[in-house]
């Protein structure tokens, strides 16, 4: 018999990274209160990670905390990014089940009740899966779908498609993630990497309740590169094949030229073909060096062993 079924009391930790979210915090806390007010065998703790906000976010959180014991605040020393903030939150979370969730109510808290139901049935991870992305800009939808396609072709383990950070994790999963030492933290990838018994609940992703998105196109592009290079060396390996592909015809061609010179004598015109070869190969080499540089850079940053985030204070 599954011991989770007759579990009397359950501590649920919500891990909520916040970066300039003064408009959304109150909505979020109200919503959590209303969703969980009926759940008597459930205690909720909300861990807000203030990721270097420059607005009133921290002040508002502190004010709310005075009347609400469920709130914990981790104030980071600057903006470390959502992945680092999530890492900080998972470190502090003490719940038996942990749910990373966005503060803008794009991850509907009602869904957590369904997730807990599946957890009680024995699943260790319950993913929130976006069934449609109509609240996203078309460009984001297209690029996201390409990202998943490419990532899942070349990287392992595969990322579940259209699943963000919103998911329920059992304590054993969180402990496993905390053991991963890398400082480049592509959380979606790490979550997938640890595995465990996984179920899914579908939801339609609503629009942001207030405020504006913190991820613009350039940040998402870098995020995608981060994801690909964190979990695959295929972009680097590709260069071996591109190298062969270019070198082999070149070799044949050079033999051909050599024989032509030996048989027909020296033939001066050839400027165009030389220029094409030089510039094309030069370009290819630069791209190749760029890819190598990306990995070398990552190795370099990783080798510094700097902490992933710094905490100013915990409230
Ligand atoms: N966030 C963060 N640090 C950052 C950027 C975002 O902690 O550097 C938080 C943000 O406050 C929100 C969550 O990550 O709670 C998701 O951000 P957002 O809603 O802007 O992303 P989107 O939903 O547009 O992908
Ligand atoms: Mg959002």
Image (cartoon, rainbow, N blue to C red):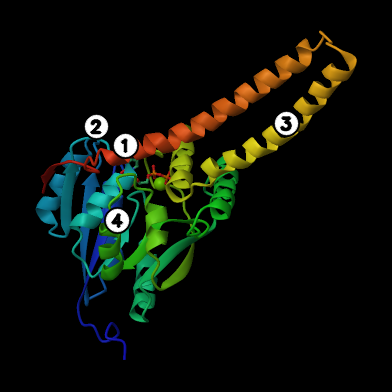
Quadrant of image for the N terminus: bottom left
Disc 1 target residue: 301
Q: Residue 14: give its label.
A: none
Q: Secondary structure at mark 1?
A: helix
Q: Residue 180: give its label.
A: 4
Disc 2 target residue: 54
Residue extending furthest toward the right:
264
Task: Compute the Cα span from label 2 to label 3.
Answer: 59 Å
Task: Compute the Cα span from label 2 to label 4.
Answer: 30 Å
Q: In the displayed structure, does residue 148 sit left or right of residue 170?
A: right
Task: Compute the Cα span from label 4 to label 1.
Answer: 16 Å
Mark positioned earlier in the residue sequence (1 or 2): 2
Q: Quadrant of residue 199?
A: bottom left
Q: Position of residue 265 (x, y in %)?
A: 86, 12
What residue sits 16% from the left and 54% below the top?
Answer: 72
Mark positioned earlier in the residue sequence (2 or 4): 2
Q: Kindly tell me whether residue 138 is visible in this rendering.
A: no
Mark positioned earlier in the residue sequence (2 or 3): 2
Front tag of 2 and 4: 4
Q: In the displayed structure, does residue 251 sit left or right of residue 208?
A: right
Disc 3 target residue: 251
Task: Compute the Cα span from label 1 to label 2.
Answer: 27 Å
What residue sits 77% from the left and 32% below the top?
Answer: 252
Q: Are marks 3 and 1 in contact (CB under 8 Å)?
A: no
Q: Secondary structure at mark 3?
A: helix
């Amino acid at each position: 018999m599954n011991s989770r079924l007759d579990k009397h009391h359950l501590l649920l930790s919500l891990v909520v990274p916040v970066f300039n979210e003064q408009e959304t915090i109150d909505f979020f806390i109200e919503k959590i209160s209303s969703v969980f007010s009926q759940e008597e065998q459930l205690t909720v703790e909300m861990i807000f990670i203030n990721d270097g906000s420059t607005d009133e976010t921290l002040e508002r959180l502190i004010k709310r905390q005075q009347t609400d014991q469920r709130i914990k605040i981790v104030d980071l020393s600057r903006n470390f990014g959502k992945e680092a903030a999530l890492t900080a939150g998972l470190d502090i979370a003490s719940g038996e089940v942990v749910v990373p969730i966005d503060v803008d109510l794009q991850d509907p808290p009602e869904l957590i009740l369904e997730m807990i139901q599946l957890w009680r049935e024995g699943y260790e991870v319950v993913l929130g899966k976006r069934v449609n992305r109509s609240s996203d800009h078309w460009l984001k939808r297209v690029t996201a779908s390409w990202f998943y396609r490419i990532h899942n072709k070349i990287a392992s383990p595969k990322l579940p498609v259209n699943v963000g950070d919103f998911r329920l994790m059992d304590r054993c999963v969180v402990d496993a993630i905390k053991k991963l030492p890398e400082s480049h933290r592509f959380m979606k990838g790490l979550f997938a990497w640890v595995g465990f018994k996984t179920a899914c609940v579908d939801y339609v992703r609503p629009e942001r309740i207030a405020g504006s998105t913190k991820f613009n196109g350039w940040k998402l592009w870098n995020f995608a590169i981060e994801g690909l290079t964190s979990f695959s060396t295929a972009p680097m390996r590709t260069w071996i094949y591109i190298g062969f592909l270019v070198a082999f015809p070149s070799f044949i061609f050079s033999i051909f030229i050599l024989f032509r010179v030996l048989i027909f004598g020296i033939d001066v015109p050839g400027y165009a073909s030389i220029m094409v070869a030089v510039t094309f190969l030069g370009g290819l080499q630069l791209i190749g060096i760029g890819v190598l540089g990306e990995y070398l850079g990552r190795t370099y940053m990783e080798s510094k062993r700097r902490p992933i985030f710094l905490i100013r204070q915990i409230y």
